[in-house]
Amino acid sequence: MAKIHKSPWLIHYDGSSCNGCDIEVLACTTPVYDVERFGIINTGNPMHADIFLITGGINSQNESVVKQIYEQMPQPKVVIAVGTCACTGGIFKECYNIKGGADTVIPVDIYVPGCAARPESIIDGVVKGIGLFKEKAAALSAEKKAL
Amino acid sequence: MTISERIIFALLYIVLAPFIIGLLDGFDRKISARMQGRRGPSVLQPFFDLKKLFEKEFLTANKMQLFLIRSYLCFIVLSGIIFFGGFDLLLVIFSLSTAAMFLILASTATHSPFASQGTSRELVQIMACEPMELLVAVGFYLATSTFTVSDIVSKSTVANIRYLPGFFVGFVFILTIKFRKSPFDISTSHHAHQEVIKGVTSEMVGKEYAMVTIAEWYENAILLGIVGLFFVSNNILTVLGGIIAILAIWFLEILIDNTSARVKWQLMLKLAWGVTIVAAGMNLFLLEIIRG
Amino acid sequence: MEVLVTALICFPFLWAILPAVIHNSKRRAFAVYLGCTIVTILSVATALKWYLAGGQALDFRLPYQHLFGEIFMWGDIFLMFFITYLSYKHKRLIISVLTIVSTVVPTVLEKFGPKLGLAPTMRFDWLTLIMVLIIGVVGSLIGIYAVGYMHGFHIHHHKEVKDRRSFFLSMIFVFFGAMFGLVTSANLLGLYFFWEVTSVTSFLLIGYTRTDEAINNSFKALWMNLLGGCGLTVAISVGIIYFHTANLYDMISAAELNPNDMLCLLPISMLAFAALTKSAQFPFSGWLLGAMVAPTPSSALLHSATMVKAGVYMLIRISTAMADNYVGNMVALIGGFTFFAASCFAITVSDGKKVLAYSTISNLGLIVACTGCGYEETIWAAVFLVIFHAVSKSMLFQCVGAIETTIGSRDVEEMQGLMSIFPKLAFILMVGIAGMFLAPFGMLISKWAALKAFIDTSSVYVSTLMVLFICFGSATTMFYWTKWMSKILGASKREKSRDLTKKNEYISMFFHAFMMIALILGFPWLSENVLKPLSDEMFGDVKQVISYENMVIMIVLLCGVFIIPFVNYILTKGQKVKQVITYMGGVNAGDNFNFISSTGDPKELEISNFYMEELLGEKKLFTPAILISSFIIIVYLIIVVGGALQ
């Protein structure tokens, strides 16, 4: 799995948030930040995605949705929580319907803090995610060989 | 053409087509990025993507999908062999439409709303393109009195574009649909674009999606080959002209892709059929008159 | 040979009495099975005997020809009174005018007109051979299917309809007899009798359920076919008065010798006109669409082995007299137009039987176009299409009938995931659909040949139009078949239920599937040993229509369609795979058929194909299609009739 890290495709899900981080994620794909130079594509489809980018907190309504999207992604996969809300629940944390950060429903690998998270830090997080992605892929192929 | 020549050409197609078209695709992304003021990915990006897709875990919503997709790939390659082996052009097109049917069956086998939506649109796309594809074969027959690709090349003393300008215009028009480029990328789209999630390929995971991508490359090789066929004659130097034409058309498609917005399928159907009737139909009529 | 052919024609007529008088369901079924078996054996025996005798065209007179002549005449008169009575009963007296005119004129001419010589009245040649086999084998299978289907129809599904099965089954035998007579007759007077019998029988079959709709549609079928009969009458009259012959082949050779003499073309044009009504081309397509109201076996019968095939049989017969003249142009244009227009309409309907009806019309359009062109390639293509169409259409109708019985609907949208609940039915449906349009099957080879021939057609504008019709028509054909096929695969939301299809229905359908595959595999043999002599007979010595090289490619493609998916299926069968649910934006309720709506409850997901009603709908385009095609026919007939009167 030598080249797997060169083509990380991501799916982006915006949970319960003010949409600030949402906009910043989209900003990453604009000419100014151009994430495509890393081979990153923003797909809309979990079946094609390698990286799950979550912005916003988890509430009782989107809990199952996030879970389902995560399950529909093929291994190896990396989850990145972008923004304070996705990391911990943020300022909404105490609301009656908020469960907290993304890690309350699915395992999160990388946390990108910020309110809203800056595009630079998002890209940083994604690049870090790519590194992790490589490790996971290697682990997976070793596991495959062991079988 | 002797048997061994046919075999060599067919083998060259099988081996080289994915590399050449994959590379063209990489340049396509690079050029598109530059047109948009970005740096863009490496030109080898399509191969990286492909390799990754093959190595992903295999999930599926319906097991039938995999064998249908493999059949799709096989049929596209078969059509390419018929074309580059220098056999009958009309049969190439029939074989291509059979292949397309396998893609459609694969995509609907899952009962997924997005894939079904994409499939219906894909069907409309096929319907929009097919008359023109058939007419191209008819055009070559009128110009050279044969459907056989090797004879079309060896029998023509001048490039057939001289007789078939209308057919060429019509064919280039539907190429935009075939290459899944804007404004006609309505069933699914190539690289970074999205349309109804990923249209026909929505439910295709990992290697399935990789196989569809390779099949598309093989198909594009045939289509670009047909573009080249318009310019090639029995003079060996015209091959160069053919290559230049292919590159020019390829660049034109990128330009169109980056300067137009997606249209609705109704408009696409009307435009494609309209252009086919006007451009190719006129050319057909005139050629018939000349032939008497 | 004479005796065999006579037996072939008379036997079904006589056997028809049996199901009519036996009212015990089991015994009647036995009688029908036995009758169908005998018909099959007789037809195959006749065909084999002729084939083994060297395959030379055979002209002969029936034994007791004079007696048969009288029977035909009195039969015609009886049919005339019968139709007049029925049209009086149903207050459509105007229709009787058609039958009176078309019966009285030839009868009077025959009795009081110029005396005709003792010409042969029958002919058996390669085309007859093919038609006899189609009618004998496919027709009989439909007969067998009908027994089981009609049982279910009355006992389980349509208790309100009066049980007239005896009548229905005996009509099927009458149909066989008439068709055998039709394809062997050389004398137009005899042919006319059989022609009228098929018209009346189909009228009776369509009106079987006696609902208002059925009666309306059956009268529509009647008047259109009687109009065609009038065309035949004109042809007979012209033949008797001007050429002193009622022999079909004499008229054809006269027209071949003088292609520019409109008087010689007149009977040919009238025969062509009659054939166009019978083969349900635009503007006469209405009757075949209306014929859907009848129980499925009769639709299968009308659409595949009989009735519409009578029309195209006639056109293939006269095609050598139509090559590159006005009549041929008319037929080709009507055929091409029908091929395209009917396939457009087929896109817009979702009723399975209606899709099949339009596809029949469309396919017949292609055959008709091929005959209108009249070159050896197109005749080769046309005959192939006739064979493939007969088998696959009969199979498809039977299958849709069985599906309707089992799932209670024949709507294409309701067949979602048929593969997973009724794999046997779905398999038959798939083979039938594949046989209709997929690459190496009938359609491809025929389209290949037809396109080539149309480019070479001498008339510039006919050639251009025909090429466009075929190119666009194949695109639309692909659309409606593929979307149907894609419905069948995949998961189904229906519960698995009992398959209500009867054993004899399955026997018939599987036999069809088997025949289909045999036909495909035997296609090079068929081309060499049956189609080639047929072309030789019609056009003199002809070279192989399709080159050796292309034959090889087609065989490769053909094997490809079976073998590639099969091999891939085997290879991927053991594939380890993790099952996931389909993507619905994360709100899949877990079963792929429901999603969690905004209120939090699961809602059912409906997936439907495109029908494009606002673009190509019947409501919008049917009338224009009728107008355009009527215009073509009228203009060309005026040219021919006007030229003849000069």
Image (tube, coloured by chain):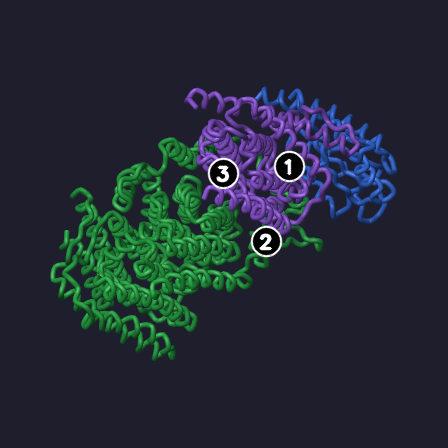
Chain colours: A blue, B purple, C green
Q: Which mark is residue B137?
A: 3
Q: Is residue C309 visible?
A: no
The residue located at (26%, 72%) in the rendering is C105
| Amino acid tagged 3 | Ala
**Which is more foreground, mark 1 or mark 3?**
3
Q: Are marks 1 and 2 on the same chain?
A: no
Using the image, determine if residue B195 lies above or below residue C288: above
Real-space Cα separation, disc 1 to disc 3, in angstroms: 39 Å
Going by the numbered disc 1, the residue's amino acid type is Met
Whole-number angstrom distance, CA of label 1 to CA of label 2:
22 Å
Answer above or below: position of B10 versus A104.
above
Q: Chain of mark 3?
A: B
Q: Quadrant of residue C82?
A: bottom left
Is residue A36 positioned above or below C268 on the image?
above
Q: Which numbered dot is residue B261?
A: none
Read off the residue under disc 1.
A47
Tags 1 and 2 touching, CB below 8 Å: no
Which of B269 and C120 lies nearest the eye of the viewer?
A: C120
| Lateral position of residue C286 relative to residue C589, left or right | left
Confirm or deny contact between disc 1 and disc 3 (CB under 8 A).
Answer: no
Residue denoted by label 2? C606
Left or right of residue C520, residue B106 in this image: right
In the rendered image, the quadrant that contains the C terminus of chain C is: bottom left
Q: Is residue A52 above or below residue C58?
A: above
Closer to the observer: label 3 or label 2? 3
